[in-house]
């Protein structure tokens, strides 16, 4: 029995296309085969970085990523790309995909404007329920990201939990829950049996 059996069923019932991979390398190879000669936008994602997807895909695609290019220009270009790549801060076994964002370009990119959105999600993001997914986003993923970014926020000091601060440097600005795929785009979820990202 796979760790993804329940969530794969839930995601398919909600209308997502789902593929599972034993390793991140297999998922990256799949995308390298599938995406050719298209424009690709990437949201802020440690998972995408860890899989080396920018370097792999830019060889035969036009790729926009604010972690590799001028940030403001790349964010704007990514919003109109054919394909958008993102991870998730949490995935509930019941099928809800939850993300938090500071500039909100990443969450916006998963909602509208592309031909296809691909979510790359490692097993460490999986939790049993929607409530636990929201808890994970606020108290695990976001504080760790704030600490990595040297944010001047209470959560960054220990990366232990959300303090629901009003700090000017707060990186938690937009919380988005996808209850199902957008009707305007193809949505694919790649489940990867490795710990990836935060």
Image: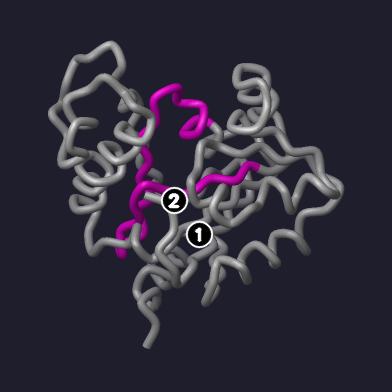
The picture places residue 89, in percent across and down from the top left corner, at 36, 47
Q: Quadrant of residue 26?
A: bottom right
Compared with 30, 196 (above or below) is above
Q: Nearer the viewer, residue 91 or 139?
A: 139
Q: Residue at x 56, y 70 (%)?
A: 19
Circles 1, 2 touching at the beta carbon (< 8 Å): yes
Q: Residues within 10 Å of mark 1 (few under 14, many from 20)?
A: some
Magenta stretch contains residue 24 = no
Stretch in magenta: 84-108
Which mark is drawn over residue 180? 2
Q: Quadrant of the N terminus?
A: bottom left
- Identified at 70% across, 33% down, the residue is 64
With 133 as the anchor, is 113 left or right in this view?
Answer: right
Q: Nearer the viewer, residue 74 or 128?
A: 74
Q: CA distance from mark 1 to mark 2?
A: 7 Å
Q: Is 97 located above or below residue 16 in the figure?
A: above
Q: Point out the tag, 1 or 2, that comes first from the N-terminus.
A: 1
Q: Is residue 89 left or right of residue 103?
A: left
**Which label number is shown at residue 15?**
1
Name the residue: 83% across, 48% down: 59
Q: Is residue 36 above or below residue 151?
A: below
Asked where in the image residue 43 lies, by quadrant, the reply is top right
- The residue most toward the bottom is 1
């Amino acid at each position: 029995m796979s760790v993804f059996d329940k969530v794969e069923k839930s995601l398919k019932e909600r209308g997502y296309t789902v593929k599972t991979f034993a390793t991140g390398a297999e998922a990256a190879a799949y995308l390298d085969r599938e995406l050719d000669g298209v424009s690709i936008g990437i949201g802020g994602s440690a998972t995408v970085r860890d899989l080396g997807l920018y370097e792999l895909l830019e060889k035969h695609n036009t790729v926009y990523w604010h972690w590799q290019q001028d940030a403001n220009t790349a964010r704007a270009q990514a919003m109109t790309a054919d394909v958008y790549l993102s991870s998730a801060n949490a995935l509930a076994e019941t099928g809800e995909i939850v993300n938090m964002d500071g500039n909100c370009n990443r969450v916006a990119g998963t909602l509208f404007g592309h031909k296809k959105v691909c979510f790359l999600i490692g097993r460490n993001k999986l939790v049993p329920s929607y409530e636990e997914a929201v808890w994970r986003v606020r108290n695990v993923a976001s504080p760790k990201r704030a600490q990595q970014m040297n944010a001047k926020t209470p959560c960054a000091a220990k990366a232990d939990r959300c303090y629901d601060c009003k700090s000017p440097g707060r990186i938690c600005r937009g919380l988005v829950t996808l209850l199902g795929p957008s009707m305007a785009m193809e949505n694919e979820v790649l489940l990867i049996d490795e710990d990836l990202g935060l």
